[in-house]
Image (cartoon, grey):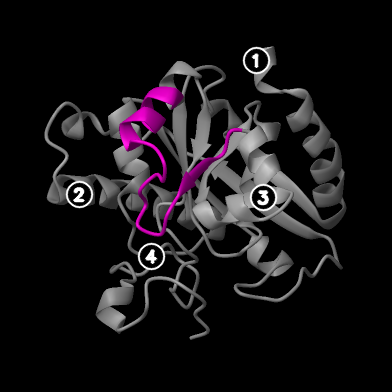
């Protein structure tokens, strides 16, 4: 089991509100939760298709025995109330470019290791643009953090959150209660990328390996085969950030 100090009074208070609320709306079923390290630092990299995903993945990781922390948009830390909670629970601020504001990214990596944290980073960076909700092209933030901190990267896929809150929907659809499946993968083999220069080409190759692992897990959940070519917003003339209704 994780160290008792991970589940601080603030985290327990939040769990006391979030867990019953989510349970009323969704049956979150975990698959291969035994693959979640019960001690030590790691990066968890899930697919991203709904704005309720952070709650889903946080609940899943909590139920798997670890405390969830996120690389979150820096702007969220300026929201009254929410910002205090995020700082109090050790969330990590980043800007749209994936750079930690107010701190050296290496310092964040060291803190990840020293405090033995589990950090959730969405490698797509935003909700997938793929019309069928398959994982799209990834960004390098999750891989960069895992390599800098020299910690495992655990791929995760979930399916069903889009029925609870469709992509860019303005509200949640709790009735009827939805089923959400979450599957944890084996750590992505990043041995070939550790200890070397982290140039962009290397990070992109490693990121592609991560996105393939997530896609494989999602194929398992959906019982379908993903497109041979991963969706790339740049090739489709789409913006990389902001709402997308196509």
The x and y percentages for residue 226 are 40, 65
Kindly identify which numbered label has been placed on residue 56: 3
* Residue to which mark 2 is pinned: 205
Q: Which residues are magenta?
A: 90-111
Q: Is residue 193 left or right of residue 186?
A: left
What distance separates the C-alpha of mark 3 from that of mark 4?
19 Å
Q: Is residue 174 magenta?
A: no
What distance separates the C-alpha of mark 4 from that of mark 1?
34 Å
The x and y percentages for residue 141 are 35, 47
Quadrant of residue 222 within the rendered picture: bottom right
Kindly identify which numbered label has been placed on residue 1: 1
Q: Is residue 95 magenta?
A: yes
Residue shown at the point (67%, 76%) measured from the top left: 169
Q: Is residue 59 visible?
A: no
Crowding at label 1, few (<14), some or many (≥20) Cα neighbours within 10 Å?
few
Secondary structure under tag 4 reads loop
Mark toward the start of the polypeptide (4 vs 1): 1
């Amino acid at each position: 089991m994780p160290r008792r100090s991970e589940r601080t009074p603030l985290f327990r208070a939040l769990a006391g509100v979030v867990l019953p609320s989510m349970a009323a709306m969704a049956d979150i079923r975990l698959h291969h939760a035994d693959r979640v390290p019960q001690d030590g630092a790691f990066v968890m990299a899930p697919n991203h298709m709904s704005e309720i995903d952070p709650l889903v993945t946080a609940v899943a990781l909590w139920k798997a025995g670890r405390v969830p922390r996120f690389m979150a948009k820096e702007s969220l830390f300026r929201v009254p109330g929410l910002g205090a909670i995020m700082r109090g629970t050790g969330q990590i601020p980043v800007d749209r470019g994936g750079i930690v504001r107010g701190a050296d990214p290496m310092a964040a990596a060291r803190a990840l290791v020293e405090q033995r944290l589990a950090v959730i980073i969405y490698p797509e960076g935003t909700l997938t643009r793929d019309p069928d909700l398959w994982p799209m092209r990834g960004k390098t933030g999750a891989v960069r953090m895992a390599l800098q901190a020299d910690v495992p990267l655990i791929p995760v896929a979930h399916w069903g959150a889009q029925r609870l809150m469709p992509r860019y929907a303005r509200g949640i659809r709790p009735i009827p209660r939805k089923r959400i499946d979450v599957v944890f993968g084996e750590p992505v083999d990043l041995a070939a990328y550790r200890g070397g220069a982290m140039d962009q080409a290397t990070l992109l190759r490693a990121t592609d390996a991560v996105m393939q692992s997530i896609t494989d897990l999602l194929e398992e959940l959906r019982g379908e085969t993903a497109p041979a070519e991963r969706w790339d917003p740049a090739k489709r003339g789409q913006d990389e950030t902001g709402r997308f209704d196509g």
